[in-house]
Amino acid sequence: MSPARKRGILIGAALAVVAIVVAAVVLLVREDRAPAASGPNDATESAPESPAQVAGRFLRLFDTGDLTTAPVDDPAAATTALSGTRTALNGASVKTSLGEVPTTPGNATTTSATFHVAWTFAGNSAWKYEGKLELVRNAGKWVVRWAMSVIHPKLEAGQRLSLAPVAAKPIVADRDGKALVGGDATGVAPILQGALSKVASGENSGTGATVTVSRVDVSGKPVETLFGQAAETDKPLVSTLSVASQNAAQKAVDGFAGPAIIVAMKTSGELLAVAQNGAAGNQPKALNGLYSPGSAFKIATATAALQQGGVSADSSLPCPGSEQIGTRTLKNDNGFDLGTVSLKTAFAASCNTTFGRLAGQLPADGLAKAASQLGLNADFEIPGLATEAGKVEPSGSGDEQVEAGIGQGRVQVSPLGAALMAATVATGKPVVPKLWQGLETKVNAGYQAPPAGVLNQVRAMMREVCTTGTAKALKGSGAVFGKTGTAQFGSGADANGWFVGYRGDVAFAVMLEGSNDSKPAVQLAAKFLAG
């Protein structure tokens, strides 16, 4: 091969290599530049959000109350409406969560999404409902189509939400549906407020709404209440008490200067009123305070004598002004002496000497048995209340029995027990005190009432007390049956005043601490009955 040909081949080969290198360089440059135009990161940033992503982002901003940067077709109108709503709802907090978002075809221009809303108001009542978002494709991107229905599905153009407090509902109602606790109850049954509220809080777990939310038109006229309607769980617990009876009893005791108590119940046992004034303290003495009943206990003494003492209401018995029985000397009030009179008359005049002698002639357990027949040794558990009817035990001596016959010594009765005794006489049946409709009283120790023939005579005697006897001031109060009592306590220098009785189907007891006379108790009974 000639030298010239060899040089030509070498030059051609060199040029070929150069061409290959240049081509490779060009190719590398092209491959290196391609990602700059369509790299994977830039592709993600520029891809439009899905309807679900748009709806979720919108709701997150909805919860903040500011939609100015939200994916919505009219951010200004949306923010203004939402701000107005939050103001109307008194700054209630809102929490939303995305619900269902249907799969959307690539060429779709509209779709929707559901979401859940919970507004929380002061008092922690919560308004929950399901909303709906309409989404439209705008310039290739999905946005929420704004309308008032986004705030609530029933809101229409020109309408808005309005908030108002719920009229307070009673937590506990009386037998007639009037509020005892909650609602418009003010100062009703003050001594029972704690017990009523405690039982109600355990029995009625429904908290109910504290506000109502309505949609109103442009003029503010309500169109529809959307939240705050009463639910079944908002129904109050119902008590046997009567607001009218309670107010009458409270007014009577509040008008007395010293400690005063009134307990009233239906003769069936349903409590109507438990009232005591400020001077009596803030402990429920009306229900469990034990006191000497004085001559009011002669109801039990008469019951015992009619059964065990061989006497009747018409039996003639002595009523001297003073008499020594055993080692005890008994005196009548102001020393009155009636001579020989019927048992009925002695009862009406409250002859201590007559009833002290009758009691001394009874068996040792005679008075305790009669007291038990009248409910004074019964034991009950009334939901919410601590109660004690009384304590009357067999006498330990003849002297004790004489004292017990006139309601002194160891005989103890509560105002509740005294009303229970009157109710038993009125009905002729054992009575179970109740405070609630639907919540039963537990009977730990029950009793059996005295025979009908005995009670018929006791009723006649109690009626005479109110017509010609120590409570004749009640003649203008209707057909009242009862018994007065004055019971010494402490050193004997002071005495409590009692009136225990019934009228129609209402039994009651009035007890005045330290009144030293039963007349004020009779006057309070008249005021209560008039109310």
Image: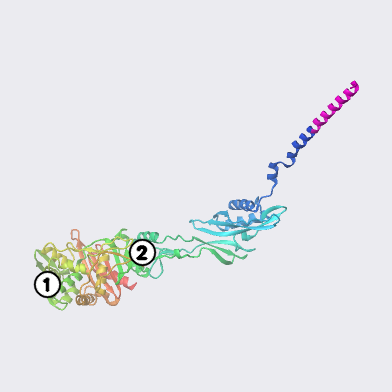
Q: Residue shown at 16%/65% (left/top)?
A: 404
Residue 176 at x, y = what percent? 39, 71
Q: Secondary structure at mark 2?
A: loop
Query: As drawn, which residue projects farthest toward the front?
Result: 1
Residue 12 belongs to magenta span: yes
- Name the residue beneath numbered marker 1: 320
Residue 424 at x, y = what percent? 25, 71
Q: Range of the magenta residues? A: 1-23
Asked where in the image residue 17 lies, by quadrant, the reply is: top right
Q: Is residue 480 visible?
A: yes
Residue type at mark 1? Answer: Pro
Residue type at mark 2? Answer: Ala
- Name the residue beneath numbered marker 2: 189
Residue 337 belongs to magenta span: no
Asked where in the image residue 112 lies, by quadrant, the reply is: bottom right
Question: Which colour style is shown?
Answer: rainbow
Q: Magenta region, mostly helix, strand or loop?
A: helix
- 204 left or right of 220 in image: left
Give whichever of discs 2 and 1 has the lower sequence position.
Answer: 2
Q: Secondary structure at mark 1?
A: loop
Q: Quadrant of the C terminus?
A: bottom left
Within-10-Å neighbours for mark 2: few <14, some 14–19, many 20+: many
How far apart marks 2 and 1 lie (CA) works out to: 45 Å
Residue 20 at x, y = what percent? 81, 31
Within-10-Å neighbours for mark 1: few <14, some 14–19, many 20+: some
Q: Is residue 520 visible?
A: no
- 123 left or right of 73 in image: left
Q: Residue shown at 91%/22% (left/top)?
A: 4
Asked where in the image residue 417 lies, by quadrant, the reply is: bottom left
